[in-house]
Amino acid sequence: MERTLILLKPDAVQRRLIGRVIGRFECKGLKVIGMRLMQISDELAATHYEAHQGKPFYAGLVQFMTSGPVVAMALEGNKAINVCRKLMGATFGSDADAGTIRGDFGISDGFNLVHGSDSPEAAQRELELFFDASDLHSYDLIDDKWNATE
Ligand code: IDP
Ligand code: MG
């Protein structure tokens, strides 16, 4: 089982898409093990997106991500990191395939609704940035058997 960090970005909150976007992850079989509505500080945005510092879109990205509340979620499941990236779709809404979150709910390139960790190392780092260990919950669901790796 893998864990990954998903952020519903400020555009998802502003556009009242929280429920529908979380529903995509739940429908797939991912388990919500942590969730918070929060405002990202400039410092947290800079740390989270440190790999993008110096890129032309960096300042706008930090401004966007700190412009209003986000929903941070820790999701768990079989190959969760890659599965979530596929559910999200390509980075730009204009490129993302129909059937993906970015492909179905937006057309903007930068305002693309969701963030998802892109590797096990990134997932561990990002989960620690957004959650205390005590706010991640291990629990059984009645359909765990059908979402297992077999
Ligand atoms: P990802 O979110 O699909 O992993 P990254 O390349 O890691 O994409 O970029 C992080 C975020 O920065 C994107 O989700 C998007 O919001 C923003 N971004 C990336 N490239 C551009 C760009 O060329 N113009 C505007 N925003 C961008
Ligand atoms: Mg990325």
Image (cartoon, rainbow, N blue to C red):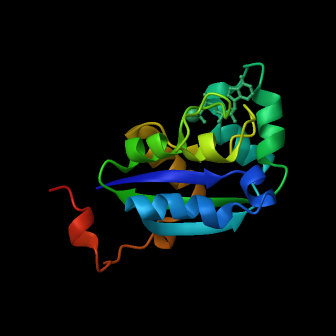
Instruction: Judge from the rendering whether residue 31 lies leftward or rightward of residue 115; answer left or right.
Output: left
Ligand 2 in which quarter: top right
Residue 40 x %, y %: 74, 53
**Residue drawn at the location 76% of the way across and 52% of the way down:** 10
Can residue 69 be seen from the camera position used here?
A: no
- Choose top left, top right, bottom left or bottom right for residue 149: bottom left
Choose between 75 and 12: the one closer to the eye. Answer: 12
Left or right relative to 89: residue 113: right
Quadrant, the C terminus: bottom left
Q: Which residue is drawn at 51% across and 58% down?
A: 24
Rendered location of residue 26, percent (x, y): 46, 64
Residue 110 x/y as whole percent: 74, 33
Q: Nearer the viewer, residue 64 or 29?
A: 29
Q: Quadrant of residue 37?
A: bottom right
Q: How many numbered callouts?
A: 0
In the image, residue 117 sits, relative to residue 69, either above or below, namely above
Q: Is residue 97 above or below residue 55?
A: below
Query: Going by the image, does 41 lie left or right of 112?
Result: right
Observer-nearest of 86 and 40: 86
Depicted 70 relative to depicted 64: above or below: below
The answer to whether any part of residue 1 appears in the image is: yes
Q: Residue pushed farthest left?
A: 150
Q: Which residue is drawn at the image coordinates 79% and 57% (left, top)?
A: 15
Spot occupied by residue 147 in the image (x, y as percentages of width and height): 27, 63
Q: Quadrant of the image for the N terminus?
A: bottom left
